[in-house]
Image (cartoon, rainbow, N blue to C red):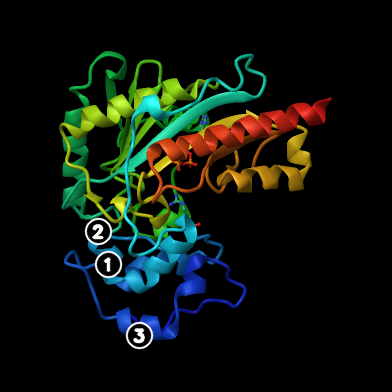
Amino acid sequence: MNDEFPKLPSNCTSMLCKHLSKEMFENLKSKQTANGFTLKNAINSGVENIDSGIGVYAGDEESYTLFSPLFNPIIQEYHDFGKNDTHQSNMNPDNLYAPNPDPDKKYIVSTRIRVGRNINNIPLGSAISKKQRNKVEASIAKALKTLKGELKGDYYPLFGMSKEVQNKLIKDHFLFKEGDRFLAAAGLNRDWPEGRGIYHNHNKTFLVWINEEDQLRIISMQKGGNIKEVFTRLVTAIKSIATKIDFSYSNHLGYITSCPTNLGTAMRASVHIALPKLSKNKLMFHTITKKHHLQIRGVHGEHSKTEGVIYDISNQRRLGVTEIVCVQDMYNGVVELIEAEKKLSK
Ligand code: ADP
Ligand code: ARG
């Protein structure tokens, strides 16, 4: 490997640039995990993409311990989660208080909740081989075939899918985009499009992405603001899939994911919501989202600019809080955003 400390410009604001010191680099640069994943592999995305927010990816569960001097402060800062904390899961829909905050469909366009999952004892996407990835695809597709009722659907591999179908699925918010430069630099787009694909039920309220950033992204979504229905469907699906697939989980870090921002619950619960007035009052908008630990994204997902007045509002914390807290954060914040929007419209 190139032994030189990477060139990181002084105006770089990513967590990688903030936390990687020369001394740390020297201590870690010759280590590698059992899968051959090195510090250089872990940081390459942030080195090549200086505008990263985070800038690091793990190649396997071991990366999080072997390179903990770098990962721990990033995990601490993103999730407010310390190295001696433990993670807890709670997916009981009965514990969620979320009556539809917008029954008249004036603000909430759609609701989506996803989790990331990876298979135990197989390298994550940054370190996986082509053969292993193809095997992962086959075993997940096989497991999904056994789903019943509302979750019943079909698997559509990306390999051989027409551009027309692919682009329509992306435009309609169902499929991951292609060519993400952050993932590419992390080694996550190797052998594209082989081994990747999407499973969905007939009306596309339940979907599974295979071998994108994580081996599985399990997704429940529908029009409108019935958050509890979306959550309940997701939990049913996660539980069914878990009877066939052994997910990678640690008591400390929860579900193991490629990116440290997704650890823990690996859950992102979002609404697409129209906020024409509030979005012009940036101070008020950001005060509410900050209070409820929310992230604002554009309508075409991460790193997209928003179009018009519709925003993607989701929970930011995922580790050290339960799934219920993730969704509750989003729900409580959305209720307050709608109240503020109504007030400003008077
Ligand atoms: P992820 O949710 O997996 O972290 P993205 O932010 O890139 O990744 O979002 C993936 C896709 O899901 C994008 O097309 C985005 O527009 C869509 N999406 C996210 N939230 C919603 C929502 N509440 N309703 C409809 N589509 C959504
Ligand atoms: N690596 C990218 C960055 O640092 C994305 C980080 C969070 N998003 C994600 N999809 N993992 O900006």
Q: Which residue is mark 1?
A: 65
Residue 61: numbered disc: 2
**C-alpha span from label 3 to label 1:** 17 Å
The x and y percentages for residue 50 are 54, 67
Q: Which residue is mark 3?
A: 26
- In the image shown, does 240 or 251 lie closer to the viewer? 251
What secondary structure is marked by label 1? Answer: helix
Q: Indicate which disc, 3 or 2, sits on the residue closer to the N terminus.
A: 3
Say which quadrant the C terminus sits in: top right
Tell me if I can see residue 93 in this picture.
yes
Left or right: 257 in relation to 275? left
The x and y percentages for residue 292 are 58, 43
Q: Quadrant of residue 102?
A: top right
In the picture shown, does residue 121 fall above or below 8?
Answer: above
Q: Are marks 1 and 2 in contact (CB under 8 Å)?
A: yes
Q: Indicate which disc, 3 or 1, sits on the residue closer to the N terminus.
A: 3
The x and y percentages for residue 203 are 40, 16
What secondary structure is marked by label 3? Answer: helix
Left or right: 46 in relation to 127? right
Amino acid type at mark 2 = Glu
In the picture shown, does residue 80 fall above or below 175?
Answer: below
The x and y percentages for residue 331 are 54, 32
Picture residue at 71% right of the left edge, 34% below the top: 308
**C-alpha span from label 1 to label 2:** 8 Å
Q: Residue furthest right?
A: 346
Left or right: 14 in relation to 341? left
In the picture shown, does residue 284 fall above or below 165?
Answer: below
Q: How many numbered marks does the figure carry?
A: 3
Q: Are marks 3 and 2 in contact (CB under 8 Å)?
A: no
Amino acid type at mark 3 = Glu
